Amino acid sequence: MKKILFNMVVISLSTFVAFHSKAQMKKNDNCDPFDAVVNNHDQIFQSSGIPSAIELVLKYCRAVDTNFYKLQNEWQNKTDGSFRDFDNKKLYGITFTQKFKLPRDANFPIDSIFRTIEKELRFGKKVIIALQLETGWPIFVVHKQTPNGEFVSYSKLGSHTLIIRNTKEIVKRSNGTEIMTYITSPRL
C-alpha cells in the first residue's frame, strides 16, 4: 500500500511540476535553518538531483546565496553523471568527497556507512545520499537522526520537498549505497 501511495504521489507531483513549473508557493523561512534552505530551493531539471543536492549543501553552509542554480544549469538533464563528477571537487570553499563506492551486496559495510553518517550529523553537517526507490536512485540530503536512530532525508521534485523517514531501511534493502560528505575550508 505504501509503495502504491508513494508512486501515486510521485506521479502526481511530476505531473504538477511539468505543467506548473513556473508556479511558486509561498515559502516559509521561520523554521530550522536547513528546512528554510530546502523550502527555498528547487530541483529545476528532472535529472539534476546530484547538483541540486550539492547546491543545497552549499546554501546550507552559506557558501552561495539562495538564488544559486549554476550547477544545475550546467548539468541540466545529464543522465550519465554520478557522484564521481563532484568527488574531491572544491566548490566555493567546500570540498566534496564520494564514499562507499562499493558493490551493493551482502558484504557491503552497512554499519560503517551508518556510523559515517551519524558522525557527520553530530558535527552539524549534512550527507548527500542516493536512495533506491521504485522510481530509480533519486538523490537526497540526510538532515538529521531521530531519537529512535533513523535518518530523515530530504530531496526536491521541482519546488516540492520530498521527505524520507526510513533512510536506514532503504539502504539496508538496497544492500548499500554511495554517499558524499564534505569539508569546509577555514574562512580567512
Image (cartoon, helix red, strand yellow):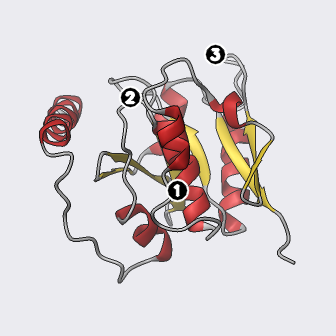
> Residue 56 — which label?
1
Residue 80 versus residue 144 in the image, above or below: above
User: Pointer 3: what residue?
Assistant: 105
- Circles 2 and 3: CB atoms closer than 8 Å: no
* Residue in the foreground of this view, choosing between 131 and 93: 93
Whole-angstrom CA distance, mark 1 to mark 3, is 30 Å
Give the mark nearest the N terminus, 1 or 3: 1
> Residue 133 — which label?
2
Q: Which mark's residue is nearer the viewer, 2 or 3?
A: 2
* Residue in the foreground of this view, choosing between 32 and 168: 32
Q: Say left or right for 34 vs 89.
A: left
- Circles 1 and 2: CB atoms closer than 8 Å: no
**Label 3 secondary element:** loop
Give the mark nearest the N terminus, 1 or 2: 1
- Residue visible at 12% across and 39% down? 19
Instruction: Tell me the kind of residue under disc 2.
Output: Leu
Q: Residues within 10 Å of mark 2 (few under 14, many from 20)?
A: few
**Label 2 secondary element:** loop
Give the mark nearest the N terminus, 2 or 3: 3
